[in-house]
Structures are given as structure tokens and as C-alpha cells.
Image (cartoon, rainbow, N blue to C red):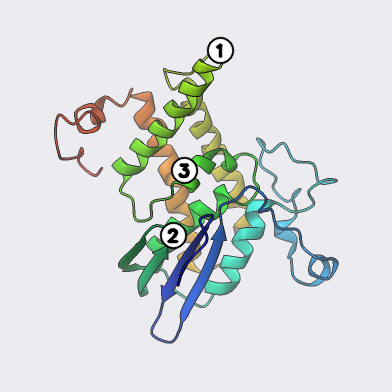
Amino acid sequence: MSIEPNLIRYVFDFEEEPIEFLIDTGFDTTEEPSPVERVEAYPDWIRLEKDQCACCPLKKEDSPYCPAAMRMHSVLETFKGHTSIENINLTVETARRTYKQNCDLQSGLNSMLGLQMATSGCPVVGQLRAMATFHVPFSSFGETLFRTVSAHLTKQYFIHKEGGQPDWDLVELKAFYETLEGLNEAFSRRVKGIGQSDAIANAIVMFFASSIVVASAIEESLEEYKDYFTGECMEPPMGG
């Protein structure tokens, strides 16, 4: 089945029946609930002012619901009867290639949640949109770190070409990932106690935990990854 260039399809294949998510990585993807949904479908924890992240620039008058929480609500409702250690066959389809992996549910959800949050309309996590455009599921930490730094430096190249002040030393990138750490705390408070499945809870923890490790690696000037990223060795650092 062909798929549009801006779409990514996640198919979680359980024994009973597959569950499919079609994710639009385009720019006009912010969900807007209908008046009926505002009353009946969306719970209080999704409202913007409920544990709103300190770094969030949105105003409830313009955006009554947290864009990332709206995406999370859909996933929560879909997988609320499942556990984190359930074994699945996960297929990820893009316009150019198809990925397949046998894994536990929490690992599959971790891969998808990052993509969904980056394309949800959240102005903070949305800064990862370039990563979403070139999404690679099942990435190791070393691969994720390489793509993160490469995407940032590519952006700095164009800033330099346009006469701006590029961030070659990754100061802004480190600051952004420190901001994600704060967003993690606020978002964790938002979803705490709403009865989510452990698969969702663990996937959220895994997604935000990576931001802490990325910030730490940048703080250390990527020294541990220097040989791996420059082709001097073939094996990543331990655990990378």
C-alpha cells in the first residue's frame, strides 16, 4: 500500500488484531476538537492550564488544550488495556521504506510518541520537527545523538549563510535539551494519576530520559563519541 510523502504509518501487530496510527509530519497538523469533543471526549488533564509547562508560550484563550496532551490522549485510550512487556511485531511505513521490528510494546510506543509530540503543534517539542521529517524508528542512542547534532549544525549552516550568528558550539542545543528536562517534569505531573497503562507511562519516561542523556553528552562536548562520529572507530561507546 503506497503512502503519501508526509505520512508515517505505525502498525502494532498484536495476536488479536493490529492497531494502526497514521501520523502526518506536515506543518498544519494541530488538532482542534469539535464543540462536542470539548464537552464529552477530552478530560480535564488535557486543558492547557492544567500543569502547563513553564516554557510553554501558548495562551489558553488561543489554545484551550495542550497539543501534546491531545496526541497523548489518543494513544492512552487506544492502549489502556495493554502492558509494557507485551510482545508485538511493529511495522513502520514511510513513502520510501518500511521498517519491521519485533519488540516490547513500550519500546514501540517510545519510538512513536517522540514523532507524535514533535508534530503535535507543541511549540517547544516542535523544535524537533527536522528530526520528525527524517524520522528513523528503532534508533540507538548513538544514532539519535548523531542525528540530533547533525540536524542542529545543518540549521546553523544556513543561519551562517544568511548572515546570522550560528551556534557552532551547541550552546543553544544544550539549552533546548535542558528545557526539555523541565517539560518532562511538568508533563509527568500532567499525566500522573490518570490511570494510564504502564506501557504508556514507561514510553513517556523513555522518551524524556533521552533528553537528559543528550544534554549530558553535549555538556561533555561529545568527547566520548568523537571517534565513533568521525569514523575513527566502528563501535559506539558502551551503551550507545
Mark closer to the observer (2, 3) = 2
Quadrant where the N terminus is found in the figure:
bottom left
Q: Residue at x 69, y 48 (%)?
A: 51
- Gap between marks 2 and 3, in whole Å? 14 Å
Q: How many marks?
A: 3
Q: Residues within 10 Å of mark 1 (few under 14, many from 20)?
A: few
The three-letter amino acid code for the residue at tag 1 is: Gly
Foreground residue, 49 or 125? 125
Q: Secondary structure at mark 1?
A: loop
- Gap between marks 2 and 1, in whole Å? 35 Å
In the image, residue 147 lies at what x, y percent? 37, 38
CB under 8 Å between discs 1 and 3: no
> Mark 1 — residue?
163
Q: Residue at x 65, y 35 (%)?
A: 55
Query: Which comes before the other along the chain, label 2 or label 1?
Result: 2
Q: Secondary structure at mark 3?
A: helix
Q: Secondary structure at mark 2?
A: loop
In the image, residue 79 lies at what x, y percent? 52, 73
In the image, residue 205 lies at what x, y percent? 46, 52
Q: Quadrant of residue 149?
A: top left
Label of residue 204 in the image: none
> Mark 3 — residue?
131
Foreground residue, 41 or 19? 19
The three-letter amino acid code for the residue at tag 3 is: Met
Label of residue 94 in the image: 2
- Gap between marks 1 and 3, in whole Å? 24 Å
In the image, residue 227 lies at what x, y percent? 19, 28
From this viewpoint, which residue is outermost toward the bottom? 16
The three-letter amino acid code for the residue at tag 2 is: Thr
